[in-house]
Amino acid sequence: MNAMIEKSDPSPAPEPMRERVVFYLILALVLAHALLAATSSLKKSGAFDEGIHLAAGNSYWTRNDFRLQPENGNLPQRLASLPLLLLKPAFPDTGDPAWQNAEQWEIAYRMMYLMGNEPRILLFWGRMTILALSVALALVVFFWSRSLFGAAGGLVSLALYAFSPTMLAHSRLITSDMAAALFFLASTGMLWRMFTRVDIVSLAFTGLLAGLLLVSKMSGLIILPVALVLLAFRVKSRKPLEIHLVRTWIITRRARKGLILFAFCIVQAAVAWGVVWGFYGFRYQAFAEPSGRFQSTLEAEVEKLGPTGYGIEFLRDNKLLPEAYLYGLAYVSSHSQVRRAFMNGRYSLEGWWTFFPFAFLVKTPLLVFLFLLAGAGGLALLWPRGNLTRLLPLAALFVVYWLFSILSHLNIGHRHILPTYPVLFILAGASALWVQKFKPAIPVLALGLGLFLFQSLWVWPHYLSFFNLASGGPKNGYKLLVDSSLDWGQDLVSLAGWLEERGLAWQNRIPVYLSYFGTASPNECGLDPLWLPSFCAAGLFDPRARPEPWKLTGGIYCISASQLQQVYNDTFGRWSRSYETAYQDARRVLLRWSASLADPDAMDRLIYDLGGEKVLIQALDDYKRLRFGRLCLHLRQREPDAFAGWSILIYEVPYKELDQALSGPPAEVYEDPGIMGRLPAGELKWIYY
């Protein structure tokens, strides 16, 4: 990995360290990281996107067809599904309507939970392939930091990475986030090497790493402005360009440097372009058979983009990139323009520029800030000024990526700034510079890293639910952020364990209600709950799921944080006067319907008054959803009685409290739902602007 970093005189290490000791420390830290991630993964049910990543990757390998989930990275889906080539799970056949219509969520749920496969085995081995990417990224962090701050600095950076709750959370999940983080850092390092020293290594790997980044996640395109920033700096810099190929050339003139580097960039862009085509079998068509289709169409997704879709149209018309890649790019671009989001009691459709700074502040351990502060002091006071240019690739990646993140409307998860954390861990390695001047810094650094390890062990296995102490800790997380920042459907195993300890897992004594945000199967985790309105796959595709009851009773109410905050429900936003009016109207219909069950004439009058039986059925269904919104309004006013993995909130609700929540005056009513931005017409029928 040293080959990725610019060769120059290394900064003196704080203290001479024997290579063997360093090697064993690296090995210990990497193994600790892998062990914490692997063991914690066994305690987690499938997170929201994991099943669909496995199903899509399996279809890429076995059918050479790219209709499923092309928007989420071909490489990580292929990598995670590699074990499936040996496990050979049952999979819907090509004549299945779900396959023909690209019903990707249904296909994923059936493969994972309804076709006789063992979901825990599929998840575990898929997660271990992503963990391999995390180990590779950990080594990149170490070697880059060591090249700057010596072996001690590299070990500090590696320890911060190894025990970071953020990195541990995503190192054991089957998503595209870890692949993107690895190849953002690796491709930036190799670009900087090529711009400084052109040799066989940089020519061989720059385009390859950039191509791997592009097929890891659609946000990989951010590497283009990063490359432009680095190229502009190198052209303007007085430092000569070294070319070491058949012979050595030293280029000093800026114009000549610019032309040569631009030519090399074109060559590397061609290599990256070839890598993208290679992952799609060097075939434009996304489908293995002529009748294949996406859930939507490429044309429909491009149309949503307006003028910004012209570039994708040009690439499509000239078939310059694979059809599936273009569809994924158009899909991500169109669906990130308007997206429901929650932050600290506020709701939005357009996002906030403060979302990612806020997520960073509450989800990053306080000790990381202290190490960064110590590192900044070390750079300012102890590092030679001439070495600052060596930080440029890290600074370029960090600043450009953060700029795009702040401008993004897609405010659904802290994970979207994951590629910036390795940069911070490398820079925090500068804290080891203090050891060179002040020997007492050694025990201070050791104490800080020891506390960091203790924190990582304390939060195990709930790394995704981590919030720092300044924000109130994990128990306060549901008030601050939801979705993949906290609640990604991963805690059914914890919920089953909590209920099992109390003898409640199978409705033995007290009714157990569940409102679940996720795609895992409660039945596979040993649960058989009474369903409340949920945003989940089981309620749609699992015949074992109980129907939602008309009448609620006192009992145990288990509610995912995203559901409690009503982010993806029909009462999105604050409880408004329009919601309360709709609820009371629906409740009156329910009371009339209940009273007329034994009176056919009264039932006929009710149907006539409403305008038909279909209207009555819809009104009763509306009542269930509005009732759940009213219940969540009440429960948000008090603390949960317990947590399952910090993401599922558990409330013990006696009947008297339930009746007060549903029949009494609402805890609070706002004039409007307080949503920033506007939804498409008709999407939320009870919102009146």
Image (cartoon, rainbow, N blue to C red):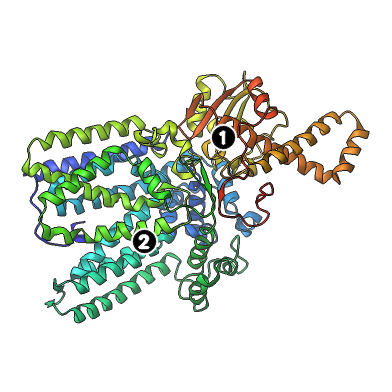
The circle drawn on residue 545 is none
Q: Residue at coordinates 51% horizontally, 27% vertically from top-left?
A: 640
Q: Is residue 55 shown left or right of residue 356?
A: right
Q: Position of residue 509 (x, y in %)?
A: 62, 18
Q: Which residue is mark 1?
A: 522
Amino acid found under the numbered disc labelled 2: Leu
Q: Secondary structure at mark 2?
A: helix
Residue 256 image position (x, y, % from top left): 19, 81
Asked if one can make out residue 487 in the rendered structure from this viewpoint, the answer is yes
Q: From where the camera sits, is residue 247 visible?
A: no
Q: How many marks?
A: 2
Label 1 is placed on what type of residue? Pro
110 versus 62 height, above or below? above
Is 465 or 247 nearer to us in this picture?
A: 465
Q: Nearer the viewer, residue 275 or 667?
A: 667
Distance between the Cα atoms at labels 2 and 1?
Answer: 35 Å
**In this figure, which residue is indicated by the disc labeled 2?**
213
Task: Indicate the position of residue 171 as horizontal and vertical percent values.
Answer: 36, 45
**On the image, which quarter does residue 37 sit in?**
top left
The secondary structure type at the circle numbered 1 is loop
Residue 521 vertical position relative to residue 286 in the rendered view, above or below: above
Query: Residue at coordinates 80% horizontally, 36% vertically from top-left?
Result: 589
